[in-house]
Amino acid sequence: MSKEPINDRIGEYLIPYISEYVFDNLSEAYLERAGVKDLLLDVPVPIKKTELADLTNLKIARSMAMVIGCDVNFPHRDKYVEYINRTFGDSFALPLLNEGVEMAAGGNPEKACIMFRGVIAIAPNNPDGYYCYGRACKDAYENGEGEEYVGRFKAESLEAFEKMTLIAPKDERGYYFLGYAYLNLGLYMKARLTFEEYIKLADVIPEETAGIPEEELNGRQEAIEEIKDWINRLEGPVEIERGYNHVLAGRYEEGIRVLTPYTEEKRYKDWWPLYFYLGTAYKGLEEYDEAISCFTKVLKYAPSDIATMEELIQIYAARNEEEMVEKYKKKIQVVKRNMEEEKAERDTSYS
């Protein structure tokens, strides 16, 4: 029975890099000498186009790691992983990690992501693989363009840090970046809880930091103070999220009660999600004038938000205001067309 394919959010951005490799079957004599005839007979292996003249087991293994890093559902993934682990063992992950770090530092986060995905395939319980992968995805979305590209790499980064905290629950690094990932997605309760876990692990008595270089300790203390500040600043956003949850649960009046005061606070009055959830609550109560006012404010701050336009279409349809229904339908078409053109332009750059 074939395995279920792995859901790969960012594969379409990384698979084109496979073009750097050619595939060929190794000779039976070569496989015999390498002791992997049972594994790779009639299995095409990747060879980097720049390394055709001087082939070694190490280069073959590295190319395999890169290919399965490009495409997590590559047909020969399992055989490649077994070959690498049988030939080199756990030690093979470390040089890949180091090379990936160099790629990220050199401004090539997509290539770094590929390398770290290869590490994760080979050593799925290595927390450094997930940590480095999460950071590389973060670099990619911070420097990338396009809503879809940024969104996919953001989700991948968050998931990498979540997996790291499960594999290494005492490693403070994962909680630091996971907290920021939740923060960027507006998941303020999760962000605060994750930051609090980071403080528990990082803010320890001096005796427990013996042997850590002074420079690293100074940086750690700065990070601790930074996160403590965020925990204090999240008090308001956490309360707002509580209001969102009331709305999502259908407790519209309670949601309005919690959220409305924040529209008067300078720090929060420009947050478009605040108005989206208020609009949703008023719509649920069939107070359409208030709902329209809130959704219109959303579009002031997020003019391409399709979900808000769809809410307005439903309200105007309920009020039989066909002219306004058509207005927002046309706006949605324009936004979707712009998104398709942006995707086509990006795809062309890969060809």
Image (cartoon, grey):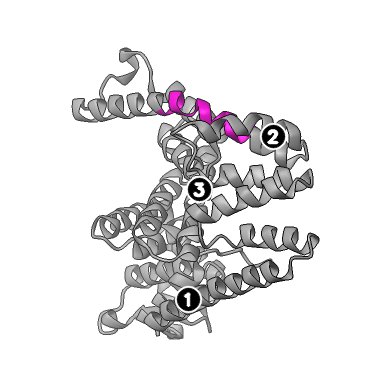
Please tell me whether the stretch drawn in magenta is mainly helix, strand or loop. helix
Q: Give the magenta-colored segment's residue range.
A: 230-242
Judged from the image, the secondary structure of the residue bearing numbered disc 3 is: helix
**Residue 259 at x, y percent in the picture:** 62, 33
**Residue 186 at x, y percent in the picture:** 53, 42
Q: Which residue is mark 3?
A: 158
- Of residues 88 and 67, which is closer to you in this image? 67
**Crowd around label 2: few <14 · some 14–19 · many ≥20 (10 Å):** many
Give the position of the C terminus as an image quadrant. bottom left
Give the position of the N terminus as an image quadrant. bottom right
Q: Which residue is mark 1?
A: 343
- Verify whether residue 137 appears in magenta: no
Q: Is residue 64 visible in the rendered structure shown here?
A: yes
Direction from residue 201 to residue 276 in the image, left or right: right
Q: Is residue 233 above or below residue 337?
A: above
Snapshot quadrant of residue 106: bottom left
Direction from residue 210 to residue 76 in the image, left or right: right
Residue type highlighted by circle 3: Leu
- Of residues 138 and 333, which is closer to you in this image? 333
Direction from residue 244 to residue 215 in the image, left or right: left
Judged from the image, the secondary structure of the residue bearing numbered disc 2 is: helix
